[in-house]
Image (cartoon, rainbow, N blue to C red):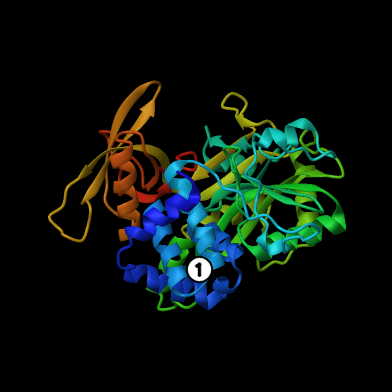
């Protein structure tokens, strides 16, 4: 089945467009003018709100766009729905010779990362091939890192890891799992292009999160939008923010340099970027600054802190032996498997709660249940994925700890694991 046949089959089976899709059309698309941007508007919507989205919802968005006369935007949604349902990617429409698409319409390359080459970058820093340095759980209490002058601290952000490879001509976005992903927003993409044309090619290591109207951080645009609705500010759109931890490249490869040099280079790049869209994550260096960081994180009920040796080199993955980069938390965060969905008597909810389990050294260990943190839309997506892959869907859960029997204490759903592809 090709794209045209797919679209025709979905149109023939057309049902009433759900009211929630109409609501999102008005509140998330029209209010931002995305419907006037053609396919670029669909790409932007999916970048902001489409993490874990299912094909049926994207089909409804395509049909809604068609009903509103926005045919180019509808085409963007059709392409995404076709890709989700068949696993096949489609090409953008051909343009006449010499015609260049507007920068806002460009998207991260769908090609194999092995086919992408940025000449000025070494092999290990090419897009889609950067293995990020990961923190491990701290073997000591946070007071050890506060008092140790060899460790510097940064606040732990509640988002998804994002590596930005910025060249004067193209911006690439890579996840922790080395997948290339769409641009977070047109504004962020343009700001990075401007900076790359000023500074030259650079690479930032950081995190992407979404800011609500109250300033709270959320992993996805949908979660931030839900927070805005709860605050009575549904018309205010979530703002994607790129938090900058450090730089891996700026006129030179910094991965073999000390962490202090990477942090300094990241701050230098951050000076050229708009603070409304980028955050240079503060670094605590002295014992007084580190104690203040921990106090602030705890008092604001943040996740915790990242502690890194100021003289360490950048080594991809987790180093549990030397522990050059560790994390201390005020809550426990785990990547767990959905073992079972507990049924409900409610006609409006697909399940009551989730039974979860953890893989430990080849064993699957039950961790109890999770019954909060998800919206109705989240529940429907959880049920859809579990039905298609029983026992194989991974979610991220935050809890206050584990009970003596090893069960979650007040577990809360945060989202799907980054490496867990939607079906």
Q: Position of residue 357 (x, y in %)?
A: 31, 34
Residue 195 x/y as whole percent = 80, 59
Q: Is residue 250 above or below residue 15?
A: above
Q: Residue at x 44, y 50 (%)?
A: 5
The quarter of the picture where residue 115 lies is: top right
The quadrant in which the C terminus is found is top left
Q: Quadrant of the N terminus?
A: top left
SS class of the residue under badge 1?
A: loop
The front one of 257 and 304 is 257
Left or right: where does residue 154 sit relative to residue 217? Answer: right
10 Å crowding of disc 1: few (<14), some (14-19), many (20+):
many
Residue 210 coordinates in the image, percent (x, y) = 54, 61
Let me know if residue 144 appears in the view: yes
Residue at point 72% right, 62% down? 103
Q: How many marks?
A: 1
Residue 375 in view (yes/no):
no
Q: Is residue 369 above or below residue 158?
A: above
- Residue located at (63% from left, 55% from top): 93
- 178 or 23, which is in the foreground? 23
Q: Is residue 209 above or below residue 383?
A: below
Between 267 and 36, the residue placed more toward the observer is: 36
Q: Residue 326: percent from the left, percent from the top? A: 58, 37
- In the image, residue 178 sits, relative to residue 106, either above or below, namely above
Residue denoted by label 1: 212
Residue farthest to the left? 345
């Amino acid at each position: 089945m090709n794209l045209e046949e797919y679209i025709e089959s979905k149109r023939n089976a057309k049902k009433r467009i759900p009211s929630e899709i109409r609501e999102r059309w008005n509140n998330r698309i029209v209010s931002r003018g995305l419907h006037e941007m053609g396919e670029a508007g669909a790409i932007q919507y999916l970048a902001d709100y489409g993490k874990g989205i299912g094909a049926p919802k994207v089909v409804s968005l395509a049909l809604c766009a068609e009903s509103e006369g926005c045919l180019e935007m509808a085409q963007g949604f059709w392409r995404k729905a076709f890709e989700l349902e068949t696993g096949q990617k489609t090409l953008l429409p051909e343009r006449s010779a010499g015609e260049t698409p507007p920068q806002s319409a460009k998207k991260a390359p769908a090609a194999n990362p092995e086919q992408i080459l940025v000449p000025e970058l070494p092999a290990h820093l090419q897009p889609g091939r950067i293995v990020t340095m990961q923190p491990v759980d701290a073997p000591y209490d946070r007071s050890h890192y506060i008092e140790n002058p060899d460790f510097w601290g940064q606040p732990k952000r509640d988002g998804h890891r994002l590596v930005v490879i910025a060249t004067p001509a193209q911006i690439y976005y890579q996840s922790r799992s080395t997948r290339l992903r769409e641009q977070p927003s047109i504004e962020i993409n343009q700001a990075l292009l401007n900076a790359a044309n000023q500074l030259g090619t650079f690479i930032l290591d950081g995190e992407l999160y979404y800011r609500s109207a109250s300033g709270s951080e959320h992993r996805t645009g949908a979660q931030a939008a839900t927070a805005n609705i709860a605050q009575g500010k549904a018309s205010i759109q979530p703002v994607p923010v790129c938090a900058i931890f450090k730089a891996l490249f700026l006129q030179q490869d910094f991965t073999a340099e000390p962490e202090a040099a990477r942090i300094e280079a990241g701050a230098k790049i951050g000076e050229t970027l708009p603070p409304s869209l980028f955050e240079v994550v503060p670094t605590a260096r002295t014992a007084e600054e580190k104690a203040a960081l921990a106090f602030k994180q705890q008092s604001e009920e943040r996740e915790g802190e990242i502690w890194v040796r100021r003289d360490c080199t950048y080594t991809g993955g987790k180093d549990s032996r030397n522990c050059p980069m560790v994390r201390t938390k005020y809550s426990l965060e785990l990547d767990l498997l959905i073992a079972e969905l507990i049924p409900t008597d409610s006609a409006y909810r697909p399940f009551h709660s989730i039974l979860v389990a953890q893989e430990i050294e080849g064993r699957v260990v039950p961790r109890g249940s999770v019954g909060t943190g998800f919206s109705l839309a989240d529940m429907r997506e959880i049920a859809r994925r579990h039905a298609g892959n029983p026992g194989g869907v991974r979610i991220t859960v935050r809890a206050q700890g584990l009970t003596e029997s090893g069960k979650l204490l007040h577990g809360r759903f945060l989202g799907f694991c980054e490496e867990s592809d939607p079906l």
